Amino acid sequence: MCPQLSVKAVLGGHDQANRFLALIDGLANKRVAIVGDVIADEFIYGRIERVSREAPVLILNYDSAEVLAGGAGNAANNVAALGGQSRLCGLLGRDNVAERLVAGLHGGVKTSSLVRPSGYVTPTKTRVLAGGVHSAKQQVVRIDKSAPAFDFSGSKTFLRAVHRAIKGCDAVIVSDYGSGLVTPALAQTIKQQCTRTTRRRPIPVVIDSRYHLLDYRGFTACTPNESEVEQLLDVRIGEDAQALEQAGRTVLKRLRMGAVLITRGSRGMALFERKNRTVHVPIFGSDETVDVTGAGDTVIATLTLALAAGASMFEATRLANYASGLVVMKRGTATVTAEELRGAVMGDHELPEL
């Protein structure tokens, strides 16, 4: 079993900070294809009026509503917000919520590979948030509307869209939220196309699978959170460092991944690579988070874009950790900009602002 290493022991002061800043500059215009499940995140905001006499529930006075891109769409928004060229490939319906989702995408997200078949219903997660006039709004209920069974994974139309999205790209994110659209076979097809290029550096293919991670093998990296790993392996990690080490190494070996990055919420991240010691990265910023919605999408977007820019897996993990610490302090399905990321690096290393 590999010994473990705390990131605090390998900090390189200003030299490392300058390396991170150079990598952030290098994120600009890197082409990342995001293939996967596009989900509409709907937020309904209201002010608490009173408790209902009909049932022990709050009555809210409607304030406003918005629809943001979730799932693969959120990962695509994060890539674009960081300055990358984002190519989103997935399914969307022809319903109103899809129109609102597309209208809200970052301007840097290319949508030419979105397929919108007739009869498809856009999966939607509706969150109702309530609060007083002078208090922060908190989520009180979430209503999920899943897309009905819709087998489109083998469609020639969708496969052509996938090939169009990944052609000439610098990296690929595969985002599997469990709809059945994204499969290990599709991911292998993407990997094979990426290996046919004449580039000196391999094109990273990074996997995010909510329920079927153990079916994906032989890719650049994957980014499960701790609870997903616990469910996959039927273990309990918590504060047990040995359990974490064993779980990470088990996933790494079984999946034959180049790296496994386990996100641990307030406990930070743990990076597992086959020939390297485990690296534990403490959380950046405050552990009093505002909203973790979509934080995993920010992690995989930053990690993959950094790899496309030439970062090592350790460097990409550090940048993803900065981005994650920033995004959980924002409400809703949020993104992080390159400027915010640069500010986090400079503040963490106590560099003077330019």
Image (cartoon, rainbow, N blue to C red):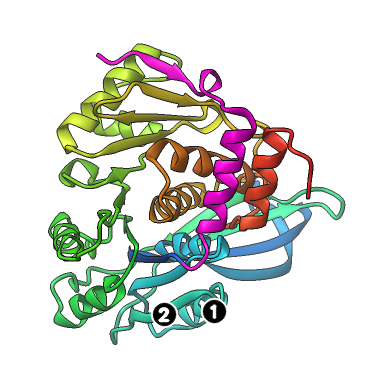
**Pointers 2 and 1 in contact (CB under 8 A)?**
no
Task: Give the residue drawn at x 19%, y 74%.
Answer: 152
Residue 60: quarter of image: bottom right
Task: Give the residue drawn at x 18%, y 38%.
Answer: 255
Q: Is residue 91 left or right of residue 10?
A: left
47 relative to 214, above or below: below
Identify the secondary structure beneath mark 1.
Answer: helix
What residue is shown with label 1?
A: 100
Residue 198: quarter of image: bottom left
Q: What's the magenta region?
A: 1-29
Could you tell me if residue 53 is visible in this image? no
Q: Amino acid at mark 2?
A: Thr
Residue farthest to the right, as pictured? 134
Image position, residue 2 (x, y; %): 28, 16
111 relative to 151, above or below: below
Image quarter where the N terminus lies is top left
354 relative to 63, above or below: above
Q: Pick whichever, 157 or 2, lies toward us.
A: 2
The number of discs equals 2
Image position, residue 204 (x, y; %): 30, 53
What residue is shown with label 2?
A: 111
